[in-house]
Amino acid sequence: MTHSAKPLLLVVDDDANVARIVSSLGHREGFQVITCSNGSEGIDVLRRRHVNLMFLDLHMPEVNGLDVLKATQRTADATHIVLMTGSASIESAVEAVKLGAEDYITKPLDFERATEIMRAIHKQFETRATIQASDAALATRLEFCGMVGRSPVITKLFDLIRRLAPHARSVLVTGETGTGKELVARAFHQLGPRRANRFVTVNCSAIVETLIESELFGHARGAFTGAVESRQGVFEAAHGGVLFLDEIGELPMAVQSKLLRVLETGELQRVGAVEPKQVDVRVVAATNRNLQEEIAKSGFRADLYYRLSVLEVTVPPLRERIEDIPYLTAAFVRDYSAAFEKAISGITPNAEDLLLKAAWPGNVRQLKNVIERACMLSESALLTEVDVERALGTSAPAAEPAVRRPAAVPSKETVLAALEATAGNKVEAARRLGVSRRTLYRLLERHEVTD
């Protein structure tokens, strides 16, 4: 995979000479450049690509510079906008600033000023790229048996697995759909004494009730119509290793009693067979159901529950570990940018905020699917708010009033002023600076500001 190391400059001007000059300056300062001769083309690019810097002509026929700003207030995510005009006015300057333009320069262009702006934005691009690379590297360091996180609840889970995996003979993993229960099961296998032996999985909810006993315990030849030969079940296949029984709450009651016998004695009987077989299997079972409620409704055997839950591990939902979303996102972006052979290095601040505000009923699996779709559809070096909204679909939170995030990195003085104005309230200071709270902590570290 080839990665682009250049920020993107968009030049929107109907004057070909101006567009050529700005484009030439951009190439010289290390930008990838796209030029558009009218406002409509510029809007289209801004909706499809993440643009780091835009030089935008104010006076164009049909769709002028202010029209472009109005049309792309939310889609121009973290874009530094420079409005160019040959006839400046206080009114247009004020409106341009309100709509998100950071700079307002007159024609003929001041080449020194234009170059200064380009160099500043290029430096910010490099700083942001460094932060994103740091996030990706940290996500790798935080990875634990395929899981990523540093929140207190997930760290506690990782520590529990490390301590108990060498000794656990049976484990019950509980948690909502999509939280990563199978990854927890695999972690117990990888860190346990049977890591060199087989790890066999079976989804109890995916097998028709009439065949599940055969799937688990095997059957003898002629045991039922179609049983033309003897066949071993997953317990025999996992002999000496670990068996993962996913969605164990879906097992029929009749099969539950036979499963309990195998767990207690290590002895199973194939369907239709006379002689029992001895197996040595460690079992990890998982469910998204509340098994104690199922017991109360006579839907699950109490004795089987107590046998399985000698060690019960609960995987926290994503809403209880929101601070892990940036690291999970960095890991998923890394994986899918490689899989799709795209030069996607990270995610814009607005897009990250959108992920942090989403409900995530499908937990980590849903987040992973959203990032996969966003990477698949994106044409930019960064996933934008539009990419994430499109990938989230109906799961996206309700739209809020558009707030343009600043493209520039706030100075130490700006950060200190925000903290002073909010009496040290970091949440409010981050809001005033137009950054996420996590970004504020990064800024504090970068500027060496201590509490």
Image (cartoon, helix red, strand yellow):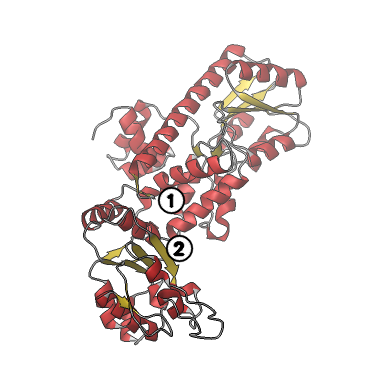
Label 2, secondary structure: give it: loop
Visible residue check, residue 409 = no
Quarter of the image where the N terminus is located:
top right
Q: Is residue 253 left or right of residue 264?
A: right
Q: Amino acid at mark 1?
A: Leu
Q: Pointers 2 and 1 in contact (CB under 8 A)?
A: no
Point out the tag, 2 or 1, that comes first from the N-terminus.
Answer: 1
In-front residue for pair 429/303: 303
Q: How many marks?
A: 2
Mark 1 surroundings within 10 Å by alpha-carbon count, few (fewer than 14), some (14 through 19), many (20 or more): some
Label 1, secondary structure: give it: helix
Q: Position of residue 334 (x, y in %)?
A: 48, 41
Disc sitting over residue 356 in the figure = 1
Q: Residue lying farthest top?
A: 112
Quarter of the image where the C terminus is located:
top left
Q: Which residue has dot 2 on it?
A: 361
Q: Position of residue 145 (x, y in %)?
A: 35, 50
Q: Is residue 173 left or right of residue 2?
A: left
**Would you place residue 307 above or below residue 321 in this image?**
below
Point out the frontmost of discs 2 and 1: 2
In-front residue for pair 326/77: 326
**Would you place residue 126 above or below residue 315 in this image?**
above
In-front residue for pair 362/200: 200
Q: Residue at x 49, y 38 (%)?
A: 346
Q: Position of residue 225 (x, y in %)?
A: 55, 85
